[in-house]
Each structure stands twice: as structure tokens, then as C-alpha cells.
Image: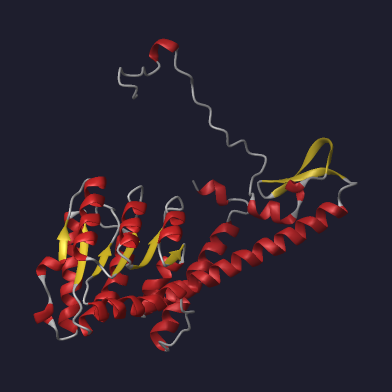
Amino acid sequence: MGLQYHDNGWIGIVITLAMVAMILLNIFRAHGTGDLYIRRIAGLNSIDEAVGRATEMGRPVMMVPGISAPVNAKTMQAINIFAYVTRVCARFANPILVCCNDATVLTVCQEVIRDVYQQEGLQDLYDVDSVRFISDRQFAFAGGVAGLILREKAAATFLMGEWYAESLILAETANSVGAIQVASSTEVTQTPFFIAACDYVLIGDEFYAASAFLTRQPVLVGSLIGQDWCKLAIIGIVIVGVISNSIQLMGGSHHTVTQRWNEGKFEGLPKPSPFNAGDTTFSRWLNPDPAKDTKIERPKLPPDEMPQKSAGGGQ
């Protein structure tokens, strides 16, 4: 495995270590100063508005952390955001409903919501039934949550996490009762449905940035800013690489090469070859051994040994 770094593969290691250093540096900065700037996301401005409207109307706030099972990073991001929403609701004594489709997610939500009420000194307002298990079946869960929205007349709904075909069912149901909706999904196929049916949508990285903005935890804030630095560094590398390759290709378009870089040294070619993209400096840096054939040959099975389809159409 170490042979891939024998030539110029160290470039990838250097870039990776530089990105790790950027993230760690910003985490230390966040621990030290604690006032690193994060641009406020427009969708987050609606949280206080949604909770305030629910309080005025005397109707509950509903939160749904997607349908992932068991707990994953997307679910935890949603729960972190819901902890802030719950904190605001607790201060106004506004009822909440959290709907879960997995027992693990249910347990985590119960602990987080209970801790929020205890931190606010309002543990007497915590209702065990405010966090509910609906169903572990996709559309049974969607039907159960939609029924709760209609019966409870939720004034605000927060749909965040991992979503699939049930997203539009819940968004349209909440829209039918006039609820303010703040939604987010990392699934690009579901984001358009949320944009069409919801008031505010956290798109892409905004979903992960929201928890850092709301909680202000140094690790989250530092990681977020460090990742932005890494993105800028990658953009800079791409720009420099495009300019460098363009200059070298334009200058060498009428030239031929008699030697090419291979395994840390130049090797002579049997005959002159046209100058191409693989001869530029950046190509040699980012492709340590361009001449090496990485194609994997797999033997083909005889027809009688090929897997046969079952009667139901599956493999």
C-alpha cells in the first residue's frame, strides 16, 4: 500500500494534514476567544417567530427528526436544533410534540428534551408524552404524524433530518392547517418538495451549520469555520492549477516530449510524443504514477455459473 506514495503521493498527505490543521486551529480559536463569527442563516430567524406565533395561538409546536434508524449524524443535527427550539418553547410554557420512528431516536429525544427543561429550571413543565413513538414503518409513520398535525392543529412544524417520499405528505398536511414550517433535508430529491411547501428551508450545509450557530459549542463552531477554510483552500488550488495547466498547455501545444515522469524519475520514450495534460506540473503532482494501469481484470463466469433471477424478479 505504501508504494503509491513512493513518487509524488506525499502531496495528498500534505494537503490532508493541512486541512486537519485548519480545523484543529479553529477549534482551539473557538475555545480561546469564543466569539468567532458565523453568518446568521435566514431560516434560523424564523424559529423565534414560529414559536411566538404558536404561543399566541395556544397551539403546540411539532418537531420531527426524520425517519432515520438508528441514530445517525443527520438525526443528531436535527435533535441539536430541536433542543434550542424546546428551550424557547419552555420559556414561554408552550406545548411541544416530538414524533419519532425508532426506539433509539425516541430515547435520545426524551433525554435531550428532559435535560433542556431541567437546565431552564422548568422540569415541572416537562411532559413525558410530548415525545412519542409513532411507527417504524415509513408511511404508517407519515400517516400517524399527519393525523397528529390535523388533530392538534400545530402552529409550527420543524421537519429536519433524513427524509424520503413521506416529506411532501407531512409538509402539505402542515400547510393545510396554516402552520409555519421550517424544514431541512440532506436528500437532494426531497429538498424541492420542502421548498415548494414550507416557509423556510435550510439547504445543504446550512443544516449542519445551524446546530453550530445555535449551540455555539467550540468544537462545532471551530469545525464549521475550519471546513470553510478548507473549501477556500481547495478553490485556490483548483484556480492555481487551471491557470498553471493552461499556461503550460498553450506553451507546449506545438512541442513534443522525449521523456516522461515515472516513479520519481524521467524515463525516455521510444519515440517523441505530443505534449499533453499529463505532462504538466500539477498533473505530475496529483498523479504520482500516471503510466500505471489501474484497471482491475475480473474473470468472467461461464453462463451456467451466472446467478439466476428468482421467480419474483430479484437476484
Residue displayed at 70% across by 63% down: 239
Q: In the rendered image, which quarter is residue 115 located in?
A: bottom left
Query: Which one is nearer the viewer's eye here, 50 or 4?
Result: 50
Q: Is residue 106 above or below residue 57?
A: above
Where residue 308 sits: x, y (%)?
Answer: 36, 17
Q: How is the image coloured?
A: secondary structure
- Between residue 170 and residue 213, name the one nearer to us: 170
Q: Position of residue 221 (x, y in %)?
A: 41, 77
Instruction: From the viewer's side, name the closer residue of 298 and 118.
Output: 118
Identify which residue is drawn at 26% across, 46% down. 139
Q: Residue at x 36, y 53 (%)?
A: 168
Residue at 11% x, 72% y is: 127
The location of residue 69, given as percent across then percent down, is: 25, 52
Q: Residue furthest top?
A: 304
Residue 103 placement, left or right of 49? left
Compared to residue 77, the image places residue 95 above or below, namely below
